[in-house]
Image: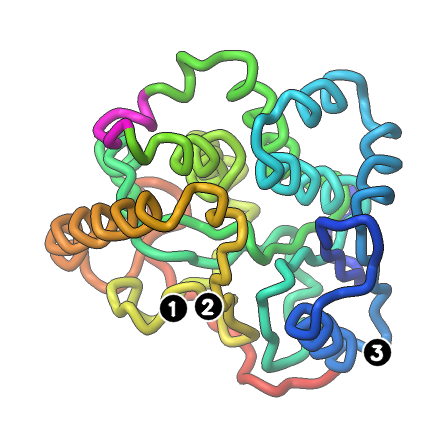
C-alpha cells in the first residue's frame, strides 16, 4: 500500500451522460482549474456500473441491495478511493486552494459537525462526526476497507444498525437509515470502533468544533454547500419536520458539547487535537 495520497480527484454525477448542469459544471471547473496537474475522473451511471462489475461479488451484491440511490453513491465513493486512491468531492463542494499540502497524508477526512447520534455520544464519547462529502486516501488504505466492510455488514445485519436508530422518530427513520448504513454516521462509527486505524486518519478539525460557522468545511481548503439533493425524495413537509427535530435535538446536545471545550481527539479517549493546515490559496 502506498503511504500517501496520489494526485487524483474523483467525482460522481448521477445521470446517463456527463453533461452537467451549470452549477455542478462550475464546481467541477473550479476543482480542475486549481489542480491542472492532477488526474480528474468524473463517473456517470454507466462508468459506475462498469466499475462495480470489476469488484468482488460480495461488494457487487451489496451495491445492488441498497434501496436508495444515495447509498449506492456512498458505497461507490469508498470503493473508488480504496481502489484508485486520491480525493473524492461531492459536486456541491467549492475549493479555495490547491490540495497538495495534503498529499503526504495517508488518509484525510473533514470534520463535518457536532452530531446528534446518542449512540456515538453514549457508547464512545464522540459528539462529532466526519463527513463523506470530501475525503482522500492512499489506495488500499485500511480505514476505507473497514468502512466498506461496515457498509456490507449494515446490509446483512440490521441488528448491528439498530442501536444507531434508537431515539429517532419513526417518521424520519428512512433518512437516518441512509446516514447510519452508508453515510457519515457509519463512517464516524467506523472511526470510533477502530482506534488503531483512527491514528492513521487526519481529521481536518477547526479551531472550535462548537462554532456553527465551522460546519461543513474541508479544513481551510474548501466548503460543502449542502445542496442535499438526495433528501428531495422525502417530501417537503417531512423534510421540514425532520429539519425542525434535528435543530431542536442539536441545540439540546450542544450544551453537552460546549462543556467538553473547543477541540476533540481523533481517537476516542485520546488527546484533543487541532490539525495545523496550510493557509488558503496555496498553489502546487
Q: Residues within 10 Å of mark 1 (few under 14, many from 20)?
A: many
User: At numbered mark 3, what does the secondary structure look like: helix, strand or loop?
Assistant: loop
Contact (Cβ within 8 Å) of mark 1 with mark 2: yes
Residue sitting nearer the eye, 177 or 283? 177
In the image, is 252 to the left or to the right of 112? left
Looking at the rendered structure, which numbered label has been put on residue 206? 1
In the image, is 134 to the left or to the right of 158? right
Q: Nearer the viewer, mark 1 or mark 2?
A: 2
**Residue 142 visible (yes or no):** no
**Quadrant position of residue 97:** bottom right
In the figure, 271 relative to 93: above or below?
A: above
Residue sitting nearer the eye, 65 or 36? 65
Q: Mark 2 = which residue? A: 217
Q: CA distance from mark 1 to mark 2?
A: 8 Å
Looking at the rendered structure, which numbered label has been put on residue 36? 3
**Residue 147 shown in magenta:** no
Looking at the rendered structure, which numbered label has been put on residue 77? none
Q: CA distance from mark 3 to mark 2?
A: 23 Å
User: At numbered mark 1, what does the secondary structure look like: helix, strand or loop?
Assistant: loop
Quadrant (top left/top right/bottom left/bottom right) for the C terminus: bottom right
Q: How far from the left and from the top, in percent, is residue 219? A: 49, 69
Residue sitting nearer the eye, 105 or 214? 214
Q: Nearer the viewer, mark 3 or mark 1?
A: 3
Quadrant (top left/top right/bottom left/bottom right) for the N terminus: top right
User: At numbered mark 2, what does the secondary structure look like: helix, strand or loop?
Assistant: strand
Q: What residue is shown at x 80% (from left), y 61% (from top)?
A: 8
Q: Residues within 10 Å of mark 3 (few under 14, many from 20)?
A: few
**Residue 167 shown in magenta:** yes
Q: What residue is shown at x 83% (from left), y 59% (from top)?
A: 18
Q: CA distance from mark 3 to mark 1?
A: 28 Å
In the image, is 26 to the left or to the right of 152? right
In the figure, 239 relative to 217: above or below?
A: above
Amino acid at each position: 500500500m502506498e503511504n500517501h495520497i496520489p494526485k487524483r480527484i474523483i467525482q460522481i454525477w448521477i445521470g446517463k451522460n456527463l453533461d452537467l448542469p451549470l452549477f455542478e459544471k462550475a464546481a467541477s471547473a473550479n476543482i480542475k482549474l486549481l489542480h491542472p496537474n492532477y488526474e480528474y475522473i468524473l463517473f456517470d451511471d454507466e462508468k459506475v456500473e462498469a466499475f462495480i462489475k470489476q469488484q468482488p461479488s460480495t461488494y457487487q451484491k451489496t451495491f445492488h441491495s441498497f434501496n436508495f440511490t444515495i447509498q449506492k453513491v456512498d458505497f461507490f465513493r469508498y470503493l473508488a478511493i480504496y481502489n484508485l486512491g486520491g480525493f473524492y468531492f461531492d459536486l456541491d463542494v467549492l475549493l479555495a486552494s490547491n490540495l497538495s499540502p495534503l498529499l503526504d497524508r495517508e488518509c484525510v477526512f473533514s470534520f463535518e459537525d457536532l452530531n446528534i447520534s446518542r449512540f456515538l455520544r453514549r457508547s464512545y464519547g464522540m459528539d462529532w462526526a466526519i463527513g463523506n462529502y470530501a475525503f482522500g486516501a492512499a489506495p488500499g488504505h485500511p480505514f476505507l476497507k473497514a468502512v466498506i466492510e461496515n457498509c456490507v455488514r449494515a446490509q446483512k445485519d440490521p441488528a448491528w444498525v439498530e442501536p444507531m436508530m434508537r431515539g429517532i422518530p419513526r417518521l424520519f427513520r428512512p433518512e437516518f437509515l441512509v446516514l447510519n448504513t452508508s453515510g457519515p454516521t457509519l463512517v464516524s462509527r467506523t472511526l470510533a470502533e477502530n482506534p488503531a486505524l483512527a491514528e492513521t486518519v487526519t481529521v481536518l478539525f477547526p479551531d472550535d468544533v462548537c462554532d456553527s460557522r465551522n460546519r461543513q468545511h474541508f479544513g481551510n481548503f474548501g466548503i460543502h454547500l449542502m445542496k442535499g439533493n438526495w433528501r428531495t425524495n422525502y417530501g417537503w413537509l417531512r423534510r421540514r419536520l425532520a429539519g425542525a427535530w434535528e435543530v431542536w435535538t442539536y441545540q439540546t446536545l450542544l450544551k453537552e458539547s460546549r462543556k467538553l471545550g473547543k477541540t476533540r481527539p481523533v481517537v476516542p479517549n485520546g488527546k484533543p487535537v487541532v490539525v495545523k493546515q496550510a493557509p488558503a490559496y496555496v498553489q502546487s
